[in-house]
Image (cartoon, helix red, strand yellow):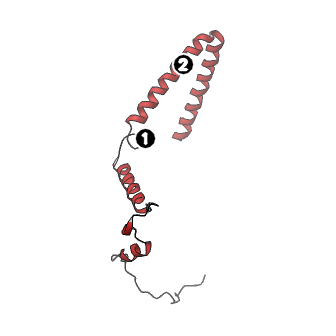
């Protein structure tokens, strides 16, 4: 119910604004242009302030989530880096050597398997 009222109010204000713009344009086009430019400038300033001051919006602020994301991206890029094409002596390591030194992950210990009777037929009443 509330969304219907809000939508109705929004559209009625939009229609009234359009009628006002048409009437202003017909009476004096120069006043219409000046009002339009002033309105666009005010909207531009408000948009700039909103983008600059609001946290959580991309490009503005630096929330904990955004910092964690950036840190993860940096570490991911660092892991994915390849060796440079210039070969300098014995400093080049092969991918096989890197794989053998990495440890395998252990399965999480907090997950347990509960054995049950999956094949057992359930007694159900037929209706």
Q: Residue furthest right?
A: 26
CB under 8 Å between discs 2 and 1: no
CA separation in Å, label 2 and label 1? 26 Å
Q: Nearer the viewer, residue 126 or 37?
A: 37
Quadrant assignment for the N terminus: top right
* Residue 16 % position (x, y): 60, 23
Q: Nearer the viewer, residue 121 or 25?
A: 25
* Residue 37 % position (x, y): 54, 19
Q: Is residue 55 above or below residue 114?
A: above
Q: Residue furthest front?
A: 89
Which residue is identified by label 1?
A: 59
Q: Earlier in the sequence, mark 2 or mark 1?
A: 2
Which residue is identified by label 2?
A: 37
Left or right of 23 on screen, residue 68? left
> Which type of secondary structure does the marked residue at label 1 adopt?
loop
Q: Is residue 126 visible?
A: yes
Question: Label 1 crowding class (10 Å Cα cut-off): few <14, some 14-19, many 20+?
Answer: few
């Amino acid at each position: 119910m509330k969304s219907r009222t809000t939508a109705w109010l929004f559209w009625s204000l939009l229609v009234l604004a359009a009628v006002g713009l048409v009437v202003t344009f017909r009476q004096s086009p120069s006043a219409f242009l000046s009002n339009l430019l002033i309105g666009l400038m005010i909207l531009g300033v408000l948009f700039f302030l909103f983008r600059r001051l609001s946290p959580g919006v991309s490009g503005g602020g630096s929330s904990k989530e955004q910092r964690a994301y950036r840190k993860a991206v940096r570490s991911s890029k660092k892991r994915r880096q390849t060796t440079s094409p210039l070969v300098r002596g014995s400093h080049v390591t092969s991918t096989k050597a890197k794989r053998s030194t990495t440890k395998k992950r252990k399965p999480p210990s907090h997950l347990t398997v509960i054995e049950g009777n999956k094949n057992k037929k359930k007694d159900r009443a037929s209706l």
